[in-house]
Amino acid sequence: MSYSHVTTFERARIETLNALNYSTRAIAEEIGRCHTTVSRELKRHTKPHEEYQSERAQASYEERRTVAVMRNGLKNLPSRLNRS
């Protein structure tokens, strides 16, 4: 099973279609993703009593990726130093 991150373009489509009251399944069909991916994206990046915002979702994603890369890079640092 292959996996790819939700793109900026897909987030913008999710925002637009969600604002038009499309269901998660209808949005998923439009962007060619599984409905659970759309549901998770909306749940993860929608604040209570606010609409989903693709720009905020993208910024949140980029921040999490930066932290993950830094954390994994620091975890592997000693093994990299031993290879010299």
Image: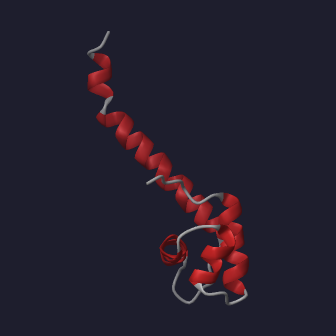
Question: What residue do we see at 48% from left, 74% from top?
Answer: 36
Q: Residue furthest front?
A: 1
- Residue 77 vertical placement versus 46 (above, below): above
- Residue 37 vertical placement versus 64 (above, below): below
Left/right of residue 27 with respect to residue 44 in the rendered view: right
Left/right of residue 32 with respect to residue 41 in the rendered view: right
* Labels in figure, total: 0
Image quarter in which the N terminus is found: bottom left
Q: Residue furthest top?
A: 84
Left/right of residue 53 with respect to residue 43 in the rendered view: right
Colour mapping used in the image: secondary structure
Question: What residue do we see at 53% from left, 76% from top?
Answer: 35
Question: What residue do we see at 49% from left, 46% from top?
Answer: 66
Question: What residue do we see at 54% from left, 76% from top?
Answer: 42
For residue 10, what is the image quadrant? bottom right
Q: Nearer the viewer, residue 1 or 36?
A: 1
- Residue 18 vertical placement versus 10 (above, below): below
Residue 38: x and y in percent read 55, 73
For residue 78, what is the image quadrant? top left
Q: Nearer the viewer, residue 49 or 1?
A: 1
Image quarter in which the C terminus is found: top left
Residue 65: x and y in percent read 49, 50
Q: Nearer the viewer, residue 22 or 72?
A: 22
Residue 12: x and y in percent read 71, 68
